């Protein structure tokens, strides 16, 4: 378990492709702050118990639980941990609402997702897997927390230090990052990752231009003199501005590639997805790959590079 001054890195296992999420534990004079929680499943409960014993704290010593965003690997254990510790859970209102949209037991989002993908060319054999797949996450986020909402523009005390609360959307609409201005440390969740590109996905009922939002976030965040990034996936790193440049270039190349496919013939999002990511995908990976493809196609359409029209009930993209 790595430690930087008052910050411990807590690796937690995941039962799907990413394999590991990094939570962070920050020590202060009033107790410990947990940043992101992992899933409510045995592997993460066991990892937290090992961490608790290794560091030597009791659950009552946790003073707050702070979430960067609503995705299950960040949000899933928050309700359980709130019950265990009595500590407040702090997150953005937007992301709590989206946690309910995607993962509440009464949500119709799983069926809406299947309908949405059907309009973009997804075959029935794939579509029928979407609702049960999305509902399979409910067990990993139950119980939901009762959060206190925090907003960008203010500050939050993490441990004994003041961090600026920054809105860093794109990966999630209400994604928050936390910046210690004095040390130049950024707790960034999934905003900026050292090895993989954060998934930028278009979902029904959410930001209609998530890639545009993310590229704007990169531009705005590039002005900060960040010296060290504590990411949710991958190792703590210091090449902050270089990584922003790499991600800008990645998306520029991806956009150029997809625009090229529509030069001479129309293309569906599913066709573009399989060209980009291949066809050997699990239902979990397909959902992210297709939604990321849609984020790129819609970015091009909204800027007049592509047009789209329906043919036999399916959206097709072509050169504008």
Image: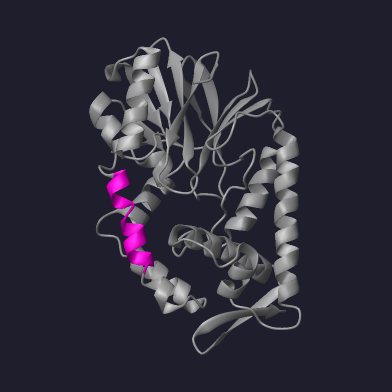
Residue 202 picture location, percent across and down? 53, 61
Is 80 displayed left or right of 209 in the figure? left
The residue lying furthest to the front in this view is: 280
Residue 73 picture location, percent across and down? 42, 42
- The magenta stretch is 129-141
Can residue 93 be seen at all in this image of the molecule?
no
Examine the residues drawn in magenta and state their main secondary structure. helix
Q: Quadrant of residue 309?
A: bottom right
The residue lying furthest to the bottom in this view is: 312
Please say if 256 is above or below 45. below
Can residue 310 be seen at all in this image of the molecule?
yes
Image quarter of the C terminus: bottom right
Q: Magenta stretch: residue 114 in it?
A: no
Q: Magenta stretch: residue 135 in it?
A: yes
Q: Quadrant of residue 91?
A: top left
Please say if 38 is above or below 268. above
The residue lying furthest to the top in this view is: 29
- Residue placed at 51% from the left, 58% from the top? 288
Q: Quadrant of residue 53?
A: top left
In depth, the one of 152 and 6 nearer the eye is 6
Please say if 203 is above or below 214. below
- Residue placed at 38% from the left, 69% from the top? 112
- Residue placed at 31% from the left, 45% from the top? 140
In depth, the one of 270 and 241 nearer the eye is 270
Residue 20 picture location, percent across and down? 48, 38
Residue 144 picture location, percent across and down? 28, 43
């Amino acid at each position: 378990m790595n430690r930087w001054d008052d910050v411990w890195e807590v690796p937690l296992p995941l039962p799907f492709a990413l394999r590991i999420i990094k939570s962070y534990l920050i020590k202060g004079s009033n107790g410990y702050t947990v940043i992101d929680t992992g899933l409510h499943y045995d592997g993460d409960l066991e990892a937290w118990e090992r961490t608790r014993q290794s560091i030597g704290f009791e659950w009552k010593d946790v003073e707050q639980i702070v979430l960067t965003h609503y995705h299950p690997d960040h949000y899933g254990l928050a309700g359980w941990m709130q019950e265990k510790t009595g500590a407040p859970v702090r997150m953005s209102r937007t992301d709590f609402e989206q946690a309910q949209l995607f993962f509440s037991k009464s949500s119709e989002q799983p069926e809406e997702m299947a309908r949405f993908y059907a309009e973009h060319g997804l075959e029935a054999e794939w579509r029928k897997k979407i609702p049960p797949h999305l509902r399979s996450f409910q067990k990993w986020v139950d119980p939901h927390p009762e959060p206190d909402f925090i907003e960008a523009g203010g500050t939050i005390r993490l441990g004994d230090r003041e961090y600026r609360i920054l809105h860093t959307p794109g990966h999630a609409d209400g994604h928050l990052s936390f910046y210690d201005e004095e040390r130049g440390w950024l707790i960034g969740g999934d905003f900026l990752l050292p090895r993989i590109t954060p998934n930028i996905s278009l979902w029904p009922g959410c930001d209609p231009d998530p890639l545009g939002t993310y590229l704007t976030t990169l531009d705005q965040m590039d002005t900060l003199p960040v010296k060290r990034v504590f990411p949710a996936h991958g190792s703590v790193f210091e090449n902050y501005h270089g990584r922003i440049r790499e991600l800008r270039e990645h998306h520029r190349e991806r956009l150029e590639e997809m625009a090229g496919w529509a030069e001479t013939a129309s293309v569906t999002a599913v066709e573009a997805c399989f060209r980009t990511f291949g066809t050997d995908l699990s239902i979990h990976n397909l959902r992210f790959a297709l939604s990321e493809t849609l984020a790129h196609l819609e970015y091009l359409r909204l800027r007049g590079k592509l047009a789209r029209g329906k043919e036999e009930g399916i959206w097709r993209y072509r050169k504008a």
